[in-house]
Image (tube, grey):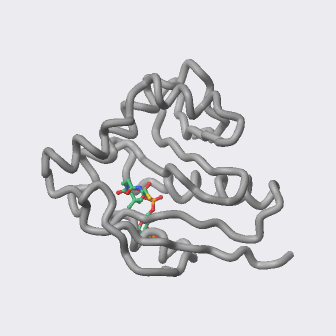
């Protein structure tokens, strides 16, 4: 597996991974509610994902094996992780852990001493295991069960 900066030509596959990850893995969040899924998936189109890849203010990374995108992640220059979605085909094989570590390393290189994000219900346990702490009340996003504000402070070298 290789983790690298996403390219324009990754947009279709990256978008498909995002959509499947949300629809098939985040059941604890959307409970298969069509209205929630419609809102959540509304901006997950190849054109929008291509726009994120092209945006200089978003660092989009993909985990790939051969020519297959296994996961998509993104971090903003101020340390906010905005995407971290694994394909259902690659779940629980260490892909998200590796991608998250790379997103954090990118944030650190850009001068941040912490990363923050809004976790799904589905990934909450994962982030706690990865050293994040919850730093506020759960919010409802797109009508989902909960969106948890989480923060990880980097240990000083
Ligand atoms: C939960 C999730 C993030 C884990 O990522 P992954 O690539 O499948 O798994 P990894 O092998 O990298 O990480 C495994 C860790 O996930 C955690 N985990 C294991 N089972 C879990 C479960 N049922 N639910 C949540 N977390 C779980 C554990 O901490 C585990 O670590 P361990 O093996 O040392 O115990 C992923 O499977 C998932 O459901 N993603 C859906 C998209 C999403 O919600 N993304 C977050 C957006 S904020």
Image quadrant occupied by the N terminus: top right
Compare residues 31 and 141 and report the one nearer the observer: 141
Q: Is residue 105 above or below residue 68?
A: below
Q: Is residue 35 above or below residue 48?
A: below
Residue at x 65%, y 50% (from the top left corner): 76
Left or right: 72 as drawn, with respect to 5:
left
Left or right: 50 as drawn, with respect to 58:
left
Q: Quadrant of ligand 1?
A: bottom left
The spot of residue 31 in percent (x, y) is: 15, 57
The spot of residue 91 in percent (x, y) is: 37, 51
Q: Is residue 35 above or below residue 67?
A: below
Classify residue 111 by image quadrant: bottom right
Left or right: 66 as drawn, with respect to 89:
right
Residue at x 53%, y 24% (from the top left corner): 10
Classify residue 9 by image quadrant: top right
The spot of residue 149 in percent (x, y) is: 48, 71
Residue at x 50%, y 54% (from the top left corner): 96
Image quadrant occupied by the C terminus: bottom right
The spot of residue 103 in percent (x, y) is: 65, 53
List the single residue furthest toward the right: 157
């Amino acid at each position: 597996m290789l983790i690298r900066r996403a390219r324009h030509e990754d947009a279709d596959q990256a978008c498909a991974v995002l959509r499947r990850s949300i629809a098939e893995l985040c059941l604890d969040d959307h409970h298969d509610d069509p209205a929630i899924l419609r809102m959540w998936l509304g901006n997950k189109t190849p054109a929008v994902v291509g726009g994120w890849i092209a945006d200089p203010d978003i660092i989009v990374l993909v985990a790939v094996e051969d020519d297959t995108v296994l996961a998509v992640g993104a971090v903003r220059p101020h340390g906010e992780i905005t995407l971290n979605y694994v394909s259902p085909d690659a779940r629980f094989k260490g892909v998200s852990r590796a991608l998250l570590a790379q997103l954090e390393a990118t944030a650190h290189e850009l001068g941040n001493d912490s990363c923050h994000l809004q976790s799904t219900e589905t990934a909450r346990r994962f982030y706690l295991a990865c050293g994040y702490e919850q730093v506020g009340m759960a919010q409802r996003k797109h009508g989902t069960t909960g969106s948890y504000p989480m923060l990880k402070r980097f240990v000083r070298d």
